[in-house]
């Protein structure tokens, strides 16, 4: 058959037709025909990680920066694909359009306890939008198109497509695919817009809570314009402190348990809360009256209809795109709430003064909030910051400056450790002209430190900042507060990561005292190289987030 190609070539052509120009993965024997097609075609860059989980996080971050999809290859059936479970679960709870091309054992070997055989389809079903096996080589391209469409449509999320190894070598008719059409949510109905406008006009203490819907929908400019028209403060949901420019007069920053006290007061005291592109989920509210006034009138707009009104009773429930909703509300008259606005401005000035005081903390080792203040002062306005999970990153969540969106990438609701470093590499692949800085603890660095080599090998210069308190900080804080200071497993010894970086070919910086982090970051940014900055921070400067989990110490 002269007019035929391999299944691997069909997959390659389908990816290219859909604008995929970068793939992440770890080489395995289950899809070498696809790798060969990539090599011959030469139009898709490949970033080879040292662990499949890390590759998945890279693709996840790539999707968040570009708008998606992010594609990762689970190129080895069985263990290689299983290693992607964490990355898929992360993408599922982040609503990130991750497309996993997962290698599988040959069709004829199924059910024979074959080497590396595992029920991959079942494994991923609970943590993805769809997990499905391709059984016909002629269906490789159509099912890949379906996977991309599903990942990118509605409430975005991961799709796992399992492809038996023999399909990649099989001959299929030559194809010339075109981009799949992605459905987009529209604006709210006129009646809903009118009802929300009326609610705002009747408010005495209005606030807007906005979330990731504005990042996926490229709606941050619309949100900013709406805040300026209404002169109503905007609170960001957890992990989305980049939805408006830092320092904007109507932007409060991140709310909820990981946010600042001004944002928390606003949502606790508001009589009208307009929720746009956010869920009011646990990570942002603890489902508690401490962060959402139970007596407030709530209008809730989200692209995911199942999320609207799920956690708090709402008066107006709307399934629509956040950006379109903001644009539709632009004609709403400015509410007359002078006292509320004045109190907000006073509180914001007080918060700014507190942050300025943190920048002057002179303890040794450096207080983490001093280190974060120095980072904030030096970060370029076009920087992308990735955060990990942990005690130090908890303190970082609302203490950095973001001016462009997307500018902040975090683990969001899955709350895993080991996300920040690979996410930074994926973000750099997506935005090579923007500086990318990952901030993590020493525990997180230990998870993924070898990926420094990935950044160097693929010429993706990223700055990794390790705030080293020699502990699993979140757990240590709980053991100290609720278990009488009886520590077990909380304290860790780490190597000199800056020296490790130098062994890999990166630049290393050691920071110990206050006033040193800012200059080190300036030097790293100026170098244009992959750098690791290891800063010793005060091991006693910990905070507990969940005080409802444990009884007082005995």
Image (cartoon, rainbow, N blue to C red):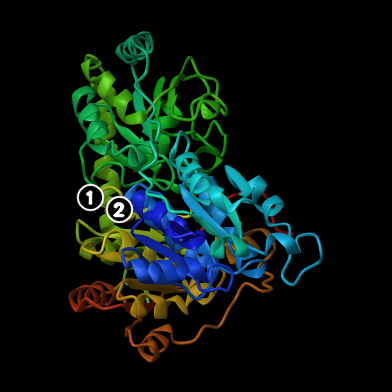
Q: Position of residue 189 (x, y in %)?
A: 37, 13
Q: Depth check: 160 or 35 in front? A: 35
Q: CA distance from mark 2 to mark 1?
A: 7 Å
Residue that badge 1 annotates:
403
In this rendered view, identify the residue nearer to me: 345 or 414. Answer: 414
Residue 158 screen position, x and y as percent: 52, 48
Q: SS at mark 1?
A: loop
The residue indicated by pointer 2 is 407
- Left or right: residue 383 versus residue 58 is left
Q: Residue at x 29, y 64 (%)?
A: 436
* Image location of residue 205, percent across then percent down: 35, 21
Residue furthest to the right in view is 112
Mark yes or no: residue 474 visible.
yes
Instruction: Place residue 219 in its image quadrant.
Output: top left
**Residue 297 as seen in the image, left or right of residue 216:** right
Instruction: Identify the mark at residue 178; answer none if there is no mark.
Output: none
Query: Foreground residue, 423 or 372?
Result: 423
Q: Secondary structure at mark 2?
A: loop
């Amino acid at each position: 058959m002269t007019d035929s190609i391999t299944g691997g070539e069909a997959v390659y052509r389908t990816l290219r037709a859909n604008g995929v120009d970068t793939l992440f993965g770890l080489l395995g024997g289950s899809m070498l025909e696809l790798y060969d097609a990539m090599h011959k075609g030469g139009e898709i860059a490949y970033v080879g990680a040292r662990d499949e989980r890390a590759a998945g996080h890279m693709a996840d971050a790539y999707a968040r920066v570009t708008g998606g999809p992010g594609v990762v290859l689970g190129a080895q059936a069985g263990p290689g694909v299983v290693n992607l479970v964490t990355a898929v679960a992360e993408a599922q709870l982040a609503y990130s359009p991750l497309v996993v091309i997962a290698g599988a054992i040959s069709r004829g070997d199924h059910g024979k306890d074959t080497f590396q055989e595992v029920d991959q389809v079942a494994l991923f079903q609970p943590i993805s939008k769809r997990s499905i096996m391709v059984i016909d080589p002629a269906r490789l391209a159509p099912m890949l198109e379906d996977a991309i469409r599903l990942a990118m449509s509605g409430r975005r999320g991961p799709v796992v497509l399992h492809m038996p190894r023999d399909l990649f070598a099989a001959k299929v008719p030559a194809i010339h695919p075109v981009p799949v059409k992605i459905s987009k949510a529209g604006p709210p109905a006129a009646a809903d817009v009118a009802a929300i406008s009326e609610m705002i006009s009747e408010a005495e203490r209005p606030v807007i809570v906005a979330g990731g819907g504005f990042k996926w929908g490229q709606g941050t400019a619309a949100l900013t314009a709406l805040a300026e028209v209404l002169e109503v403060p905007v609170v960001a949901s957890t992990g989305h402190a980049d939805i408006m420019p830092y320092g904007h007069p109507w932007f409060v920053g991140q709310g909820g348990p990981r946010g600042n006290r001004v944002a928390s007061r606003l949502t606790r005291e508001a009589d009208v809360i307009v929720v746009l592109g956010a869920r009011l989920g646990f990570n942002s509210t603890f489902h508690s009256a401490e962060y959402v006034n139970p007596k407030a009138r709530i209008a809730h707009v989200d692209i995911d209809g199942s999320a609207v009104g799920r956690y708090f009773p709402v008066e107006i429930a709307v399934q629509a795109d956040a950006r379109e909703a903001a644009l539709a509300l632009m004609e709403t008259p400015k509410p007359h709430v002078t006292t509320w606005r004045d109190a907000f401005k006073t509180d914001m000035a007080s918060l700014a003064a507190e942050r300025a005081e943190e920048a002057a903390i002179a303890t040794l080792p450096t207080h983490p909030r001093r280190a974060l203040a120095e980072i904030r002062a030096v970060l370029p306005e076009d920087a992308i910051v990735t955060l990990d999970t942990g005690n130090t990153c908890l303190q970082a969540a609302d203490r950095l400056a973001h001016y462009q969106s997307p500018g902040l990438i975090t683990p969001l609701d899955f709350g895993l450790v080991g996300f920040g470093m690979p996410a930074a590499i994926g973000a750099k692949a997506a935005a090579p002209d923007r500086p990318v800085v990952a901030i993590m603890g020493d525990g997180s660095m230990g998870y993924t430190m070898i990926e420094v080599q990935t950044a160097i090998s693929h010429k993706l210069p990223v700055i990794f900042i390790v705030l080293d308190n020699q502990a699993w900080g979140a757990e240590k804080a709980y053991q100290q507060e609720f278990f009488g200071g009886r520590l077990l497993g909380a304290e860790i010894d780490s190597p000199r990561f800056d020296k490790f970086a130098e062994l890999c070919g990166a630049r290393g910086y050691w920071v110990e005292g206050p006033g040193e982090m800012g200059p080190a970051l300036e030097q790293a940014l100026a170098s244009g190289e992959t750098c690791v900055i290891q800063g010793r921070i005060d091991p006693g400067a910990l905070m507990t987030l969940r005080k409802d989990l444990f009884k007082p110490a005995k």
